[in-house]
Image: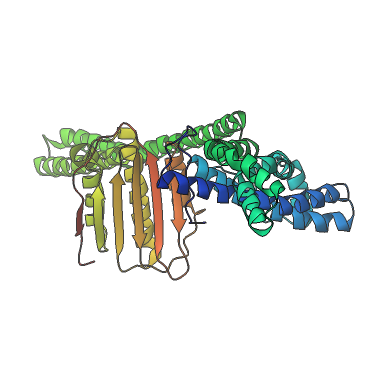
């Protein structure tokens, strides 16, 4: 479905010129196709009417498993056509039936509001929708038909019909965009989600995102507490013990006291390193110093793998989004080193004024599992900011993780920089 259809920008009358004439011919062709699709819609409507009452017997299941998928394909075509005409995407929102058996699938269809909208559309297609489309075609075809009739039979009747049909061309010119758009709007209203459904779905997504964000925050707090307890706290306690012992030995054994103080100094340095590590796990200082692009470069420099960077995200980003993106890229690169068996990796990033887009890929063996703890964590982290993660990882590679984060408050960036960060790419 890559063939573009004319988007209806306005239904107001336009001057008669070549471009406007071609546009109306294309819209008339669309209307003709929609009118012809009334035939399969009628057949599928009748099959569906027969299937549901007979669902308790084998015949009903057979009819349902023919009619419902076929209806989905037909409505998918109409969604695409109407979406092209209106300049938007009309989604279906079907209930998920992946992995279900035929019996369960049929009952899911029966309870799915989107399937009932499809059924309603079938009857709209053979009634009001057909009328809207056939009027457009008839207004153009009737004068042409009468002209051919007059050529074949030079009777007064054909001449009179041709004379009376002349104004039809004017009406066709004036009403074609309005009628085609009216049908597209009606199909959007039937096949698309209502405003209430969209809000309900959005509330569900926000609730899930909030719950996962709270779980993630709680896990981060526990991790920080564990790191402090096992690392810096233990070392600082050891420093206190060593200083106390040195104080007692200072008068009787100065050499032992000096050794203990030296050990305490070394332990203090180790404790500071532990504290810095904990801080980097909360919000890496490199983000504040160099921004997201610089932080990603620092990660790439540190891993034992050639990583090619193409980043155009040097502008200032909101700190929470920047931090989420940083840790997501870090997790992806860590997974590559641990599991991908790759010889090279790459990271690209861009920001278009509303969306931050990051792509992490490698030439490894592929087969990455999006449900794995690492990638699932990335997805949860992004979801808290209405972000998305898309994974493509066929067996044999390459693996490509595409992450997108809405970021309307960020600022532009400078020109992209592309170079290998560690070794040849």
Q: Quadrant of residue 393?
A: bottom left
Is 26 positioned to the left or the right of 188 in the image? left
In the depicted structure, whether residue 83 falls above or below residue 370:
above
Front in this rendered view, residue 164 or 131 = 164
In the depicted structure, whether residue 67 falls above or below residue 175:
below
Picture coordinates of residue 337, whole percent (x, y): 34, 61
Residue drawn 68% across the image and 49% down it: 158
Front in this rendered view, residue 21 or 249 = 21
In the depicted structure, whether residue 306 falls above or below residue 176:
below
| Way the structure is coloured | rainbow
Residue drawn 17% across the image and 42% down it: 260
Is 270 positioned to the left or the right of 143 in the image? left
Is 345 positioned to the left or the right of 67 in the image? left
Front in this rendered view, residue 229 or 307 = 307
Picture coordinates of residue 252, whole percent (x, y): 12, 37
> Does residue 49 appear in the picture of this structure?
yes
Residue drawn 35% across the image and 53% down it: 359
Front in this rendered view, residue 126 or 227 = 126
Residue drawn 24% across the image and 56% down it: 309
Residue occupying the far bottom of the picture: 396
Q: Quadrant of residue 306?
A: bottom left
Picture coordinates of residue 400, whole percent (x, y): 40, 59
Query: How many discs appear?
Result: 0
Quadrant housing the C terminus: bottom left
Picture coordinates of residue 9, whole percent (x, y): 45, 37
Is 11 positioned to the left or the right of 341 in the image? right
> Does residue 377 appear in the picture of this structure?
no
């Amino acid at each position: 479905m890559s063939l573009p259809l004319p988007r209806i920008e306005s239904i107001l009358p336009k001057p008669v010129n070549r471009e406007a004439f071609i546009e109306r011919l294309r819209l008339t062709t669309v209307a003709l196709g929609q009118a012809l699709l009334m035939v399969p819609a009628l057949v599928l409507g009748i099959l569906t009417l027969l299937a549901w009452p007979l669902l308790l017997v084998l015949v009903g299941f057979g009819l349902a498993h023919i009619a419902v998928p076929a209806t989905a394909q037909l409505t998918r075509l109409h969604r695409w056509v109407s979406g092209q005409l209106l300049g938007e995407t009309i989604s279906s929102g079907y209930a998920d039936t992946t992995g279900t058996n035929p019996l369960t699938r049929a009952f899911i269809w029966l309870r799915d509001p989107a399937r009932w909208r499809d059924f309603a559309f079938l009857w709209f297609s053979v009634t009001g929708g057909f009328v809207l489309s056939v009027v457009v075609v008839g207004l153009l075809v009737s004068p042409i038909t009468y002209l051919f009739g007059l050529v074949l039979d030079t009777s007064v009747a054909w001449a009179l019909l041709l004379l009376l049909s002349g104004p039809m061309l004017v009406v066709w010119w004036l009403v074609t965009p309005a009628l085609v758009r009216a049908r597209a709007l009606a199909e959007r209203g039937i096949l698309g989600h209502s405003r209430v459904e969209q809000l309900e779905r959005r509330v569900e997504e926000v609730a899930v995102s909030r719950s996962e964000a709270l779980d993630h925050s709680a896990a981060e707090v526990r991790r920080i507490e564990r790191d402090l307890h096992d690392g810096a706290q233990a070392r600082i306690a050891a420093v206190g013990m060593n200083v106390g012992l040195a104080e007692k030995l200072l008068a009787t054994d100065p050499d032992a006291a000096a050794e203990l103080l030296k050990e305490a100094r070394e332990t203090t340095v180790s404790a500071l390193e532990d504290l810095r590590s904990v801080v980097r796990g909360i919000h890496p200082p490199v983000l504040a110093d160099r921004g997201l692009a610089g932080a990603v470069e620092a990660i790439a420099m540190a891993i034992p793998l050639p990583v090619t960077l193409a980043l155009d995200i040097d502008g200032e980003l909101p700190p929470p989004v920047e931090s989420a993106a940083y840790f997501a890229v870090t997790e992806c690169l860590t997974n590559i080193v641990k599991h991908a068996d790759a010889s090279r990796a790459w990271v690209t990033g861009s920001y278009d004024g509303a969306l931050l887009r990051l792509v992490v890929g490698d030439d490894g063996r592929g087969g990455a599992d999006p449900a794995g703890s690492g990638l699932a964590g990335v997805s949860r982290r992004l979801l808290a900011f209405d972000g998305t993660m898309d994974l493509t990882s066929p067996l044999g590679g390459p693996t490509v993780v595409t992450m997108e984060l809405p970021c309307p408050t960020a600022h532009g960036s400078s020109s992209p920089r592309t170079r290998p960060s560690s070794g040849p790419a």
